[in-house]
Amino acid sequence: MSKYWSAVVQGLTPYVPGEQPKIDKLIKLNTNENPYPPSLIALQAMREEIGPGLRLYPDPNADRLKQAIAQYHGVSAQQIFVGNGSDEVLAHTFLGLLRHDRPILFPDISYSFYPVYCGLYEIAYNTVPLADDFSIETAGYLQPNGGIIFPNPNAPTGRLLPLDRIEKIAAANRESVVVIDEAYIDFGGQTAIPLIERYPNLLVVQTLSKSRSLAGLRVGFAVGHPDLIEALDRVKNSFNSYPLDRIAIAGAVASFSDEEYFQRTRAAIIATRDALIEKLEILGFSILPSAANFILMRHPAHDAAQLAAWLRSKSILVRHFRLPRIEQFLRVTIGTDQQCEAFISELDAYLNASKNSSG
Ligand SMILES: *Cc1c(COP(=O)(O)O)cnc(C)c1O
C-alpha cells in the first residue's frame, strides 16, 4: 500500500494466475496449457512476419484475422471482436456490456477472474450456487440481473451445459447480455455461436490459448451481434488501439488454416483425458464429468493440499484452490499420454505408501 495509489487500486484483489515456474523438467499440469506445440503452419507464418514490416503499426482492426474467424465459424466479420487474449476481451465485456445498475450473475464456483473484473470496474454481482453435482443450475439465472457470464464447459469443474440450456438462459434474459466464455469448448462441447443469429443479447468468447496451443501469443475473440461488438470496439479504442501485434495476427490467421492439426491434437487430448479418468477411478478417485482439457478430482481418503504438495515434490504441478466446496479437489490439466502415465504412477506410489504406513 502506498499513499500514491488511487482509491480503486487500494481496493483491488488481483487475480493470481497458476504458477509459471522457471525450472525445466517439471510436468506442468496446473494452468490448462496445451501439451502439444502450435501448428507448424502457424509457426512458419509468424517467422515470416518477422522482418522490416515490424517498423509499422499493425492493422488496428486486425481485419485479416476477423475475416479468418468469421469464415471459420460461418458468421460475418462485423460479428467479431479480437483482443489480446480472451482475458482482455472479457475485461472489455465487463466494462462495455456488463456494467449496469443491477448486479450481474455468475456461478459460485467459476473462473476466478470474474470477481476481479467486477472489483476493477466497480460492478456489483451475485453468485448462483452450482447444484450438488457441480452442474450449472439454469433456474438461478431467471432472476432480474444486469448481465450473466459463465464458462462453458465451466472452469474449474469441467462440466458442460448443453446448448438447449444456454438457449433457455439467453431467451429468458433478453434485457441483458449473456456471455458464454468458451475457453474449453473444443474439448467436447458444442459452441453457442450459431445462436447469436437469434439472440442479439448473446456474446460468445473464445481463445486460441487452449485448443490451439497458443497461450503465449495472447489471442482471444468474441462473436455476437454487431451492436455488442461495437461496444467492445468503443472500449478498445479508448484503451489500446493495437491490442494484437503483427506476429499475433499472422500466427492466429494461419492457425485457423491448419484444420487437420487442430482436429488431431484436440482428439488426442480427449482420448488421453478419457483414458486418464478410467485409471484414476481404478485408484479410487472421484472425477467430475469433464468436457475440458482438465479434470477436477478428489480422493475420499486423502487431503487435496497434501496430495498437491507431494506431487510437487515429484516435479508434477497441479492446481489446488483453497475455496469453499472445492478445497478437497485438485484441478489437473490433461498432458501428453506420457505425462499422464507419470502422474498416475506417482499417485499409485503415494496411495501404496500411505496404505503401508497406516496398515
Ligand atoms: C484460460 C481461460 C481464459 C483466458 O484465456 P486467454 O485467452 O489466455 O486470456 C478465459 N476464460 C477461462 C474460463 C479460461 O480458463
Image (cartoon, rainbow, N blue to C red):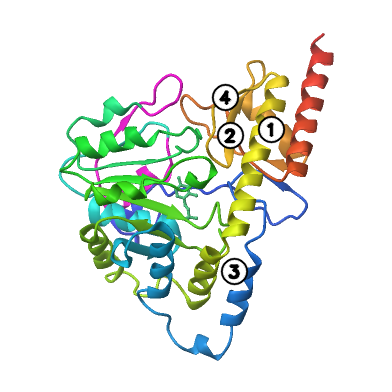
**Residue at point 17%, 42% (across, down):** 174
Describe the element under mark 2 as helix, strand or loop: strand
Q: Earlier in the sequence, mark 3 or mark 4?
A: 3
Q: What residue is pinned by disc 4?
A: 328
Cβ–Cβ below 8 Å for labels 2 and 1? Answer: yes
Report the mark closest to the observer, 4 or 2: 2
Decide if ligand 1 comes within 8 Å of the CB at mark 3.
no
Residue 283 left/right relative to 318: right
Report the mark closest to the observer, 3 or 4: 3
**Magenta span:** 110-136
| Amino acid type, mark 4 | Gln
Q: CA distance from mark 2 to mark 1?
A: 9 Å
Q: CA distance from mark 3 to mark 4?
A: 40 Å
Examine the rendered structure and indicate whether residue 345 appears above or below residue 48: above
Q: What residue is pinned by disc 1?
A: 276
Q: CA distance from mark 3 to mark 2?
A: 28 Å
Examine the rendered structure and indicate whether residue 154 appears above or below residue 22: above
**Residue at point 61%, 40% (across, down):** 270
**Residue at point 60%, 28% (across, down):** 297
Residue 261 percent coordinates (x, y): 62, 58
Report the mark closest to the observer, 2 or 1: 1
Q: CA distance from mark 4 to mark 2?
A: 13 Å
Q: Is residue 99 covered in magenta?
A: no
Dot 3 crowding, Cα within 10 Å, few <14, some 14–19, many 20+ = many
Describe the element under mark 4 as helix, strand or loop: loop
- The answer to which image quadrant residue 124 occupies is top left
Residue 42's disc is: 3
Q: Earlier in the sequence, mark 4 or mark 2?
A: 2
Cβ–Cβ below 8 Å for labels 4 and 2? Answer: no
Q: Earlier in the sequence, mark 3 or mark 2?
A: 3
Residue 272 percent coordinates (x, y): 68, 39
Residue 129's disc is: none
